[in-house]
Image: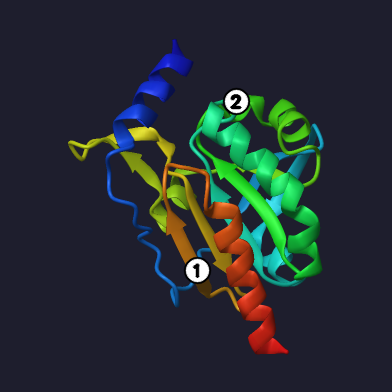
């Protein structure tokens, strides 16, 4: 039943305009979140990840839905390119977080962490998925951010289609690295 509700919410949202509210230049809210990596419990702290370089923080609606499976597998396949550019990839969702351990090993191929987005994180990044009538759901929109080590948002993209998220975030990381020399 929950899966059908999530899919219905996703279907309703496809006609909505694609914009990310936390714009480039904004300070990304710091957070610590519980999640999983390679099927094991894992804690994600944004500030710690930023010490290593830029972070690609992508929000997805729900584990084990078609678009989210495709997106996670594509991020996993491109992870060597992100690592070569010095970036860390972190996925976050408010949808069916009880399944993140299995999702992290099956669709993320154990290559990057996925975590549960708290209401404060969802609000701070303004990624709550809304229906066409403006009412809220209990899941996050498909929104990707690239965050510089100083905590500033370099890039933001919201689109329910997972197609461009990987290419666009990798391009943003590469442009950042090229400016930094």
In the image, what residue occupies the spot 54% across and 26% down?
65
Q: Secondary structure at mark 2?
A: loop
Quadrant housing the C terminus: bottom right
In this rendering, the answer to whether 79 lies above or below 96 is: below
In the image, what residue occupies the spot 62% across and 60% down?
56
Q: Which residue is mark 2?
A: 64
Closer to the camera in the image, 80 or 60: 80
In the image: residue 113, left or right of residue 57: right
Measured in 3D between alpha carbons, the distance from the residue under mark 2 to the one under mark 1, in whole angstroms, is 26 Å
Residue 28: where, in percent of width, then height? 51, 67
In this rendering, the answer to whether 93 lies above or below 101 is: below
Q: Residue furthest top?
A: 1
Q: Residue furthest left?
A: 133
Residue 167: where, in percent of width, then height? 59, 58
Closer to the camera in the image, 8 or 96: 8
Residue 107: where, in percent of width, then height? 71, 33
The answer to which quarter of the image holds residue 119 is top left
Whether residue 63 is visible: yes
Q: How is the image coloured?
A: rainbow
User: Along the polypeptide, which appears first: circle 2 or circle 1?
Assistant: 2
Q: Which residue is mark 1?
A: 155
In the image, what residue occupies the spot 67% across and 70% down?
54
Whether residue 30 is visible: no
The answer to which quarter of the image holds residue 10 is top left
Quadrant housing the N terminus: top left
The answer to which quarter of the image holds residue 176 is bottom right
Residue 47: where, in percent of width, then height? 66, 66
């Amino acid at each position: 039943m929950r899966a059908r509700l999530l899919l219905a919410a996703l279907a309703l949202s496809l006609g909505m305009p694609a914009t990310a509210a936390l714009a480039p230049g904004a300070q990304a809210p710091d957070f610590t979140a519980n999640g999983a990596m390679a099927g094991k419990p894992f804690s994600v702290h944004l500030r710690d990840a930023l010490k290593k370089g830029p972070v690609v923080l992508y929000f997805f609606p729900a584990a084990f839905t078609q678009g989210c499976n495709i997106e996670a597998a594509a991020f996993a396949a491109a992870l060597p390119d992100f690592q070569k550019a010095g970036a860390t990839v972190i996925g976050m969702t408010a949808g069916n977080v009880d399944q993140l351990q299995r999702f992290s090993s099956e669709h993320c191929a154990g290559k990057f962490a996925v975590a549960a987005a708290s209401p404060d994180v969802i609000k701070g990044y303004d990624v709550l998925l809304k229906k066409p009538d403006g009412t809220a759901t209990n899941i996050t929109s498909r929104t990707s951010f690239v965050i510089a080590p100083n905590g500033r948002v370099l890039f933001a993209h919201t689109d329910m289609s997972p197609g461009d998220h990987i290419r666009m975030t990798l391009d943003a990381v590469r442009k950042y690295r090229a400016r930094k020399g």
